[in-house]
Image: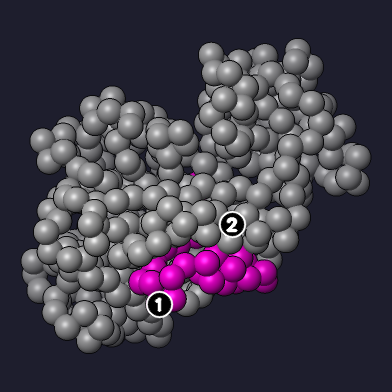
Amino acid sequence: MLQAASVSCSGDDSRAVGKDLGSELLDSLGRDPDVVLLFAATRYASADLLDGLAARLSPRTRVVGCTSCAEINSEEALSDSATAMGLCLDGVDVAVAHARDDADDSAAIGRRLGEDLRDFDPSLVILFVDGTRLNSTPLLAGMQAVLGRDRPIVGGVAADDLRFVRTEEFVDGEALSGAAVALALRGPLRVESVVASGWQAMGRNRVITRAADSKTITELDGEPALEVYRTYLGGFGRDIDTAGLEFPIGVLARPGEEVLARGDAFIRAVQGPAADGRGVRVSGDIEEGSTVRLMRTSREALIDSARAGIADAVAAMPAPAFALVFDCAGRKVVLGPRYKDELAAALSALPPGLPTVGFFTYGELAPRDGETIHHDETFTAVLVGVDGA
């Protein structure tokens, strides 16, 4: 039977905070957890935090996690905390894998993770990817080339409090950088995923007729993408230098896909003008030939979408054992102080007291029609339960 508990601690002494986390997990669970998922603000010295946690827990406890932009527990969204979930996984097998590459070759790292986990044949993979040196799209493609495109993979891109300098990924007693770490679970698990955007499409469908690279849209319908985007923003009295998060681009279909056949658009935040003065840069990978729309939203729409997404998942799985939440740092910026309201709304739709943990990410990893992709500015979550429970 799965047993879970989440706790949050804060303080000035990183090792003491790690010890407090370990002690509170032991008190809540009544035993050493098999696995700890750990998310921490960059104010903490990660090595000391992990050392303190290890001082309180069994050496058999596996630890996986990363640095964050804000942390999520069963009650609220937090800033400047260390937040952890302990899992006792009776009847569920565990494997942990991590990989780095001297050249920061994301695809090679993904293939290596896939190869390490292939024989384990996981029911669910929980993945955390470096947020400043790696690209989660080719990394996912590398994993999926080995494990299959329909393998359930969820998680997030590590963050560093919007500094965009260095993120860290945790695996057991190590704090790595430039790495991807994965927790693989195998057993009679049920998984229900949530992908909720709250963004509304505006204007007409457009096709990316030219892309300079995987993150630069040069032309939309043969017109300079920057000109199209500036014209669009001008109607709202906004400027590209400040409005890229509030007015992202939604991808309706990739090349060869039927428009809208795969559900709602997935989101790409606009980061600013490209160096050529014609294009726009986006935060996640795009493909030439994709059909896109320009997007907008309101704070209420973002909050309502998170609540509705969780409610739909709970309707499909009324009694999960625990929940994981991976929300976007971009949404946090757009929502401002109301980012806490979004989490409160989402958590209110969960069963009372359900153990929950997560963090605000630089990109969310969640399925779209059965295939995990990188999302931007999206609220994602996963409910995990056991068949027959």
Res 308 label:
2
Residue at point 79% right, 36% down? 202
**Which quadrant of the view contains residue 236?**
top right
SS assignment at label 1: loop
> Can the viewer see residue 92?
yes
Label 2 amino acid? Answer: Ala
Write the start and end of the magenta stretch as one range: 337-363
Give 283 or 327, whichever is nearer the viewer: 327
Whether residues under marks 2 and 1 lie with C-beta atoms below 8 angstroms apart, the answer is no
For residue 166, say whether it is visible.
no
Question: Residue at horizontal 66%, vertical 49%?
Answer: 198
Q: Position of residue 354 (x, y in %)?
A: 38, 72
| Nearer the observer, 99 or 102 | 99
Please tell me whether residue 265 belongs to the stretch shown in magenta. Answer: no
As displayed, is residue 18 above or below residue 382? below
Residue annotated with mark 1: 353
